[in-house]
């Protein structure tokens, strides 16, 4: 869906399509509300905060709706003793951890791909001592934690790691409307940037954006309709 259509649909649902009164909606307001709607909608679907309570990959619909936000990213890792840590911080478009794939190496055996479970940093001491959960080259299993915007993959110093690939959910691409002026930076947008979601999801996001704008402008009817419609049809 192009941004001209998106703007028209927002104005239509706010009943401002042909209005010349004081609360006309400017392009930058549509951009800000729609981008906020994208973040809020995505976080709810990942968490399962929808009427069906199906979160990340818990149904075909959630898989289909969110798959384009999943990205694999090769990452460099460094040996820190009992764990290996990603060299660079998480990418700027990072939203949520999915998994990290690594290959392990050992002097006595062939290299193997490890199964890596995400764990809590506060439990790492217990996990490293637990016979069933501690890093094991023989069983090709270990655990990772997230701290200070980096991932740590634990080895207990028993094997090395290579070829790490982080898979994560990225932030939705912020839309931009050509010609709109950002009131925060006073810069004018030169080109259109369209949403990466499918048109059926954009329709839901428009309702959500309408609810956000209506709440800001104290338009009760439009706020209720937009907020309810966005999730009822999800």
Image: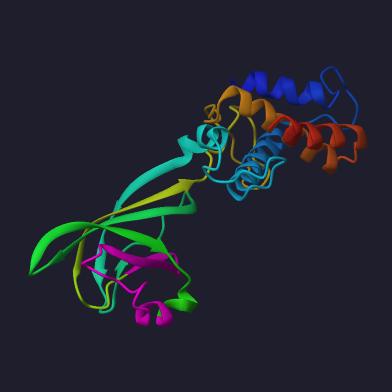
Which residue is at a point 86% across and 32% down the rendered structure image? Answer: 222
Give the answer, above or below, for where 195 lies relative to 114: above
Quarter of the image with the N terminus is top right
Which residue is at a point 59% across and 40% down the rendered structure image? Answer: 187
Give the answer, above or below, for where 130 lies relative to 47: below
User: As drawn, is 107 to the left or to the right of 125?
Assistant: left
Give the answer, above or below, for where 127 lies relative to 66: below
Residue 219 lies within the magenta run: no
Residue 147 lies within the magenta run: yes
Give the answer, above or below, for where 208 lies relative to 200: below
Which residue is at a point 83% across and 43% down the rendered structure image? Answer: 216
Between residue 41 and residue 57, name the one nearer to us: 57
Examine the image and state in which quarter residue 53 appears.
Answer: top right
Spot occupied by residue 73 in the image (x, y as percentages of width and height): 33, 48
User: As drawn, is 225 to the left or to the right of 149?
Assistant: right
Between residue 143 and residue 6, name the one nearer to us: 143
Spot occupied by residue 60 in the image (x, y as percentages of width and height): 53, 33
User: As drawn, is 8 to the left or to the right of 56?
Assistant: right
Colouring convention used in this rendered image of the protein: rainbow
Examine the image and state in which quarter residue 138 appears.
Answer: bottom left
Between residue 10 and residue 108, name the one nearer to us: 108
Examine the image and state in which quarter residue 3 appears.
Answer: top right
Magenta range is: 125-153
List the single residue furthest toward the left: 108
């Amino acid at each position: 869906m192009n941004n001209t259509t998106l703007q028209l649909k927002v104005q239509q649902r706010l009943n401002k399509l042909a209005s010349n009164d004081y609360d006309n909606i400017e392009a930058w307001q549509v951009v800000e509300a729609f981008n906020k709607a994208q973040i809020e909608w995505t976080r709810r679907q990942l968490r399962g905060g929808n009427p069906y309570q199906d979160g990340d990959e818990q149904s075909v619909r959630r898989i289909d709706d969110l798959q384009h936000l999943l990205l694999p990213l090769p990452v460099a890792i460094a040996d820190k003793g009992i764990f290996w840590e990603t060299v660079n911080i998480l990418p700027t478009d990072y939203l949520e951890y999915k998994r990290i794939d690594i290959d392990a190496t050992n002097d006595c055996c062939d290299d193997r791909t490890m199964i890596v479970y995400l764990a809590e940093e506060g439990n790492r001491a217990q996990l490293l001592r637990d016979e069933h959960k501690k890093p094991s080259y023989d069983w090709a299993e270990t655990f990772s934690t997230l701290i200070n915007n980096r991932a740590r993959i634990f080895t207990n110093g028993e094997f090395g790691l290579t070829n790490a690939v982080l898979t994560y959910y990225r932030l939705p691409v912020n839309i931009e409307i050509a010609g709109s002026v950002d009131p925060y930076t006073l810069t004018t947008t030169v080109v259109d940037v369209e949403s990466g979601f499918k048109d059926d999801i954009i329709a839901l996001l428009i309702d959500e954006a309408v609810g956000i704008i209506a709440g800001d402008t104290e338009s009760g009817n439009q706020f209720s309709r937009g907020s309810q419609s966005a999730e009822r049809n999800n």
